[in-house]
């Protein structure tokens, strides 16, 4: 394991993240990023990987997100700007950018990262989309985007490409079938797989209870 970022850089990075997300209510908030960072450090504990790259990629993975900052997404300008202004070497910057570009869920166009650091950060980001927190985020995002909680007539899409997934505008319950329940089998690391199992089961229980309540049975 390589050593992580210097404490002063880490402190600046946390302040930068705080500034970037101060106005967001779409599920891309500062607390999401901090949870991804903590989970990534947990997963990193069991792998031979570059901790500084993991810390940077985890904390910067959403600062140039297409929903939050579309004008900087292509060049990851905010992430790169932070790293250059803190003297991070170009090799590390390139590794962080690769990990960030490979992280996101894109339906059937999702990629498995080709570095251990990318695998860890992708797992950490995906863990935050499932389980109790994932459920909360799905409905928070749905509310933000004006989606209904559940519309029985709306059937979830299957095998969605990135384009079809992004175009999807149906109810929040459908998001479980279009993304959340698929993530368990898309985890990269053994530690991530284990954590995903428990969170996955919790979502299945949640959905069973949801439908029972919907039918007025429980
Ligand atoms: P991430 O930060 O994991 O890359 P996204 O940018 O895809 O996530 O979305 C932010 C949060 O909103 C995630 O928890 C995601 O699962 C949720 N979300 C995205 N699209 C939808 C949707 N159509 N309905 C409900 N929740 C959604
Ligand atoms: Ni994220």
Image: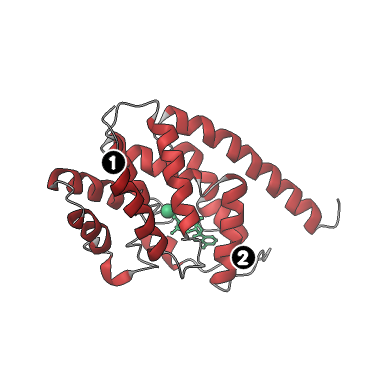
Q: Residues within 10 Å of mark 1 (few under 14, many from 20)?
A: some
- The circle drawn on residue 154 is 2
User: How crowded is the residue under tag 2: few (<14 C-alpha within 10 Å), some, or many (20+)?
Assistant: few
Is residue 184 depicted above or below 25 in this figure?
above
Label 1 to label 2: alpha-carbon separation: 47 Å
Q: Nearer the viewer, residue 31 or 110?
A: 31
Q: Position of residue 133 (x, y in %)?
A: 58, 50
Q: Which residue is mark 1?
A: 5
Q: Is residue 119 above or below residue 19?
A: above
Q: Residue at x 26, y 67 (%)?
A: 72
Which mark lies nearer to you, 1 or 2?
1
Element on which disc 2 rests: loop
Q: Could you say which is closer to the camera, residue 113 or residue 214?
A: 113
Foreground residue among 147 and 12: 12
Q: Earlier in the sequence, mark 1 or mark 2?
A: 1
Does the residue tagged 2 have its C-beta within 8 Å of any atom of ligand 1?
A: no
In the depicted structure, whether residue 96 falls above or below residue 155:
above
Q: Is residue 113 visible?
A: no
Residue at coordinates 42% horizontally, 33% vertically from top-left?
A: 43
Residue nearer the viewer, 109 or 11? 11
Figure colour scheme: secondary structure
- SS label for mark 1: loop
* Residue 126, x across and y down, in percent: 46, 46
Q: Is residue 105 above or below residue 202?
A: below
Q: Residue furthest right?
A: 217
Q: Which image quarter: residue 216? A: bottom right
Quadrant where the image shows the N terminus: top left
In percent of the image, x 34 and y 38: which residue is there?
Answer: 119
Tell which residue pokes out farthest to the front in this image.
8
């Amino acid at each position: 394991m390589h050593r992580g970022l210097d404490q002063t850089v880490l402190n600046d990075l946390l302040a930068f993240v705080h500034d970037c997300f101060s106005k967001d209510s779409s599920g891309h908030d500062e607390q999401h990023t901090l949870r991804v960072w903590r989970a990534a450090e947990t997963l990193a504990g069991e792998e031979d990987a570059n901790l500084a790259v993991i810390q940077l990629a985890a904390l910067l993975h959403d600062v140039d997100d297409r929903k939050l900052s579309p004008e900087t997404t292509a060049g990851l300008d905010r992430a790169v700007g932070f790293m250059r202004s803190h003297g991070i070497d170009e090799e590390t910057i390139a590794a962080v950018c690769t990990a960030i570009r490979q992280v996101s869920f894109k339906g059937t166009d999702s990629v498995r990262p080709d570095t251990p650091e990318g695998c860890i950060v992708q797992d950490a980001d995906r863990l935050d989309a499932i389980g109790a927190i994932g459920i909360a985020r799905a409905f928070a995002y749905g509310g933000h985007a004006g989606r209904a909680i559940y519309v029985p007539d709306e059937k979830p899409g299957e095998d969605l490409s990135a384009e079809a997934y992004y175009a999807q505008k149906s109810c929040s319950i459908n998001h479980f079938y279009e993304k959340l329940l698929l993530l368990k089998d898309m985890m990269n690391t053994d530690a991530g797989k284990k954590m995903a199992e428990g969170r996955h089961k919790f979502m299945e229980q949640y959905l069973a209870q949801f439908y029972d309540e919907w039918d007025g049975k429980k």
